[in-house]
């Protein structure tokens, strides 16, 4: 074997080892996520018959789950991304409306960007689009929704297939048109939440 062939094989072997190491770092590709925490809104602007009033609600809760995929790619930027199908449920008391709760069921498609570090802490940002169904007093309407997230996760050595963290999320949505007792009311809906998170890779 001449020197050129030997050098070529060495370069190929090094590339394969690097590719394998990178793929192992990104593997396994699928995970299940859980999240829950405290949620609040900015107050609902409710418009009935052209008259707008602000409805303030108490702080409430959020809980949900996601199914995520991490693509095993080396393409710059995309080698930092992961993708999720996510469901969340929110509930806020509305003491000013006869005790009726404001509830929402939200389904989103998310893209998240993980920032690489040299330790077990993993900061990330992300966003998503989807639909949310706002329920007020037993009546509901589904509208377009979008969200932004920023979080920090930790990968413990004693549970290598898991990540645990905390994050902030903002959810915005198009106005929901609720018909209650024959009266149409438009609600301007958005939500802020602080959540504990967990991801289980498989």
Image (cartoon, helix red, strand yellow):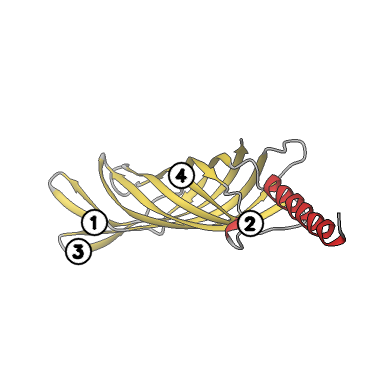
Residue ID at (55%, 48%): 195
* Residue extending furthest toward the front: 1
Q: Viewed as shown, does residue 119 lie left or right of 2? A: left
Q: Which residue is mark 2?
A: 74
Residue ID at (54%, 55%): 112
Between the residue at mark 4 and the residue at mark 1, the CA separation in whole angstroms equals 26 Å
Disc 2 + disc 3, Cβ < 8 Å: no
Between the residue at mark 2 and the residue at mark 3, the CA separation in whole angstroms equals 55 Å
On the image, the x and y values in percent for residue 9 come to: 79, 54
Q: Residues within 10 Å of mark 4 (few under 14, many from 20)?
A: many
Residue ID at (42%, 49%): 108
Q: Quadrant of the C terminus?
A: top right
Q: Which residue is mark 3?
A: 51
In-front residue for pair 60/160: 160
SS at mark 2 in the image? loop
Q: Earlier in the sequence, mark 2 or mark 4?
A: 2
Between the residue at mark 1 and the residue at mark 3, the CA separation in whole angstroms equals 10 Å
Frontmost of labels 1 and 3 is 1
Q: Earlier in the sequence, mark 2 or mark 3?
A: 3
Q: Residues within 10 Å of mark 2 (few under 14, many from 20)?
A: few
Q: Which residue is mark 4?
A: 86
Frontmost of labels 2 and 3 is 2
Q: Quadrant of the N terminus?
A: bottom right
Frontmost of labels 1 and 2 is 2
The label shown at residue 186 is 1
Between the residue at mark 3 and the residue at mark 4, the CA separation in whole angstroms equals 35 Å
Residue ID at (77%, 36%): 158
Between the residue at mark 1 and the residue at mark 2, the CA separation in whole angstroms equals 47 Å
């Amino acid at each position: 074997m001449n020197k050129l062939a030997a050098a070529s094989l060495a370069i190929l072997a090094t590339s394969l080892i690097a590719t394998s190491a990178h793929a192992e770092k990104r593997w396994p590709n699928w995970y299940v996520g859980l999240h829950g925490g405290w949620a609040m809104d900015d107050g609902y602007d409710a418009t009935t018959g052209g008259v707008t009033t602000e409805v303030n609600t108490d702080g409430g809760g959020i809980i949900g789950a996601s199914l995520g995929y991490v693509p095993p790619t080396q393409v710059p930027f995309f080698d930092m991304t992961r993708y999720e199908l996510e469901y969340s449920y929110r509930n806020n008391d509305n003491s000013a409306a006869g005790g009726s709760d404001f509830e929402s069921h939200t389904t989103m498609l998310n893209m998240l960007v993980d920032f690489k570090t040299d330790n077990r802490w993993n900061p990330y940002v992300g966003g998503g689009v989807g639909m949310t169904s706002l329920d007020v007093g037993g009546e509901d309407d589904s509208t377009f929704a979008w969200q932004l997230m920023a979080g920090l996760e930790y990968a413990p050595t004693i549970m290598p297939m898991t990540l645990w963290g905390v994050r902030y999320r903002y959810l915005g949505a198009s106005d929901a048109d609720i018909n209650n007792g024959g009266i149409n009311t438009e609600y301007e809906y958005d939500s802020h939440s602080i959540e504990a998170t967990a991801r289980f890779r498989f």
